[in-house]
Amino acid sequence: MRLRITVSRFEILKTAISGIGNFLSGSILYALSPGVPALAILGASSNTVTNCRVDTPAGHGVVLSTGSDRNAVSASTLTSAGTGYGLRISGAYNTVSASRIR
Protein backbone atom coordinates (compact mmCIF):
# COMPACT_ATOMS: atom_id res chain seq x y z
CA MET A 1 0.00 0.00 0.00
CA ARG A 2 1.33 3.42 -0.97
CA LEU A 3 0.56 6.35 1.30
CA ARG A 4 0.47 9.85 -0.15
CA ILE A 5 0.20 12.94 1.98
CA THR A 6 -0.87 16.34 0.70
CA VAL A 7 -0.30 19.45 2.83
CA SER A 8 -1.48 22.81 1.58
CA ARG A 9 -1.53 26.33 3.06
CA PHE A 10 -0.31 25.56 6.60
CA GLU A 11 2.23 27.02 8.99
CA ILE A 12 4.39 24.11 10.09
CA LEU A 13 7.15 23.78 12.68
CA LYS A 14 9.95 21.32 11.83
CA THR A 15 8.84 18.70 9.30
CA ALA A 16 10.26 15.41 8.06
CA ILE A 17 8.98 13.67 4.93
CA SER A 18 9.56 10.02 4.17
CA GLY A 19 7.87 7.85 1.58
CA ILE A 20 6.94 8.41 -2.03
CA GLY A 21 4.74 10.95 -3.79
CA ASN A 22 4.02 13.48 -1.02
CA PHE A 23 2.97 17.03 -1.97
CA LEU A 24 3.64 20.15 0.11
CA SER A 25 2.25 23.42 -1.24
CA GLY A 26 1.65 27.01 -0.16
CA SER A 27 2.96 26.47 3.36
CA ILE A 28 5.36 28.20 5.74
CA LEU A 29 7.87 25.89 7.42
CA TYR A 30 10.30 26.96 10.10
CA ALA A 31 12.66 25.57 12.72
CA LEU A 32 13.23 27.32 16.03
CA SER A 33 16.30 25.34 17.09
CA PRO A 34 19.72 26.02 15.56
CA GLY A 35 21.07 23.09 13.56
CA VAL A 36 17.63 21.59 12.89
CA PRO A 37 16.32 21.86 9.32
CA ALA A 38 12.82 23.28 8.85
CA LEU A 39 12.19 20.53 6.28
CA ALA A 40 14.04 17.23 6.02
CA ILE A 41 13.28 14.83 3.18
CA LEU A 42 14.78 11.59 4.43
CA GLY A 43 15.42 8.78 1.96
CA ALA A 44 12.21 9.75 0.18
CA SER A 45 11.58 9.99 -3.55
CA SER A 46 9.21 11.67 -6.01
CA ASN A 47 8.00 14.31 -3.55
CA THR A 48 6.99 17.87 -4.50
CA VAL A 49 7.49 21.11 -2.54
CA THR A 50 6.00 24.15 -4.26
CA ASN A 51 5.11 27.73 -3.33
CA CYS A 52 6.52 27.33 0.18
CA ARG A 53 8.56 29.54 2.48
CA VAL A 54 11.16 27.73 4.58
CA ASP A 55 13.14 29.48 7.33
CA THR A 56 15.66 28.34 9.93
CA PRO A 57 17.82 30.41 12.32
CA ALA A 58 20.97 28.29 11.78
CA GLY A 59 21.69 25.07 9.95
CA HIS A 60 20.04 24.13 6.68
CA GLY A 61 16.54 25.26 5.64
CA VAL A 62 15.78 22.15 3.56
CA VAL A 63 17.77 18.90 3.55
CA LEU A 64 17.36 16.23 0.88
CA SER A 65 19.30 13.34 2.42
CA THR A 66 21.10 10.49 0.70
CA GLY A 67 18.53 8.29 -1.00
CA SER A 68 16.15 11.22 -1.53
CA ASP A 69 15.94 11.05 -5.30
CA ARG A 70 13.73 12.61 -8.00
CA ASN A 71 12.17 15.24 -5.73
CA ALA A 72 11.05 18.66 -7.03
CA VAL A 73 11.27 22.04 -5.31
CA SER A 74 9.73 24.95 -7.18
CA ALA A 75 8.57 28.54 -6.69
CA SER A 76 9.76 28.51 -3.07
CA THR A 77 11.97 30.61 -0.79
CA LEU A 78 14.49 28.59 1.23
CA THR A 79 16.42 30.52 3.89
CA SER A 80 19.04 29.87 6.53
CA ALA A 81 19.83 32.93 8.63
CA GLY A 82 22.90 31.30 10.10
CA THR A 83 25.79 29.05 9.14
CA GLY A 84 23.88 26.55 7.00
CA TYR A 85 22.53 26.55 3.47
CA GLY A 86 19.00 27.35 2.37
CA LEU A 87 19.07 23.99 0.56
CA ARG A 88 21.39 20.99 1.04
CA ILE A 89 21.07 18.11 -1.42
CA SER A 90 22.71 14.70 -1.00
CA GLY A 91 20.30 12.69 -3.17
CA ALA A 92 20.33 12.32 -6.96
CA TYR A 93 18.20 13.59 -9.86
CA ASN A 94 16.43 16.28 -7.80
CA THR A 95 15.04 19.39 -9.51
CA VAL A 96 14.98 22.94 -8.16
CA SER A 97 13.31 25.64 -10.26
CA ALA A 98 12.06 29.23 -9.92
CA SER A 99 13.12 29.32 -6.26
CA ARG A 100 15.03 31.77 -4.11
CA ILE A 101 17.75 30.19 -1.96
CA ARG A 102 19.55 32.23 0.70
Image (cartoon, rainbow, N blue to C red):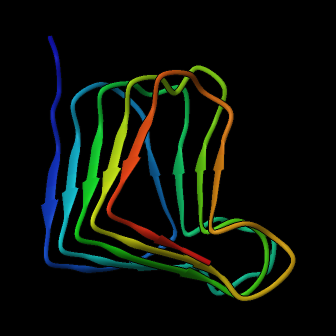
Query: Residue 73, percent across and down?
Result: 35, 51
Residue drawn 78% across the image and 70% down it: 59
**Quadrant location of the C terminus in the rendered image:** bottom right
Comparing 72 with 1, the one in front is 72
Residue at the spot 80% in from the left edge and 69% down from the top edge = 84
Give the number of callouts.
Answer: 0
Q: In the image, residue 98 lies at what x, y percent?
A: 32, 63
Which residue, as the protein is rendered here, is positioned at the far right? 83
**Nearest the eye: 47 or 17:** 47
Residue found at the very far front of the displayed protein:
98
Q: What percent of the width, then of the height, locates residue 41?
A: 50, 43
Q: Nearer the viewer, residue 93 or 5?
A: 93
Residue at 64%, 65% (x, y): give it.
37
Left or right position of 70 against 62: left
Q: Quadrant of the N terminus?
A: top left
The quadrant holding residue 77 is: bottom left
Residue 75 picture quarter: bottom left
Residue 85 shown left or right of residue 6 in the figure: right
Q: Viewer-proximal residue, 27 or 33? A: 27
* Residue 26 spot, x, y in % from top left: 18, 74
Q: Is residue 44 above or below residue 40?
A: above
Instruction: Identify the residue at image location x=70%, y=65%.
Output: 60
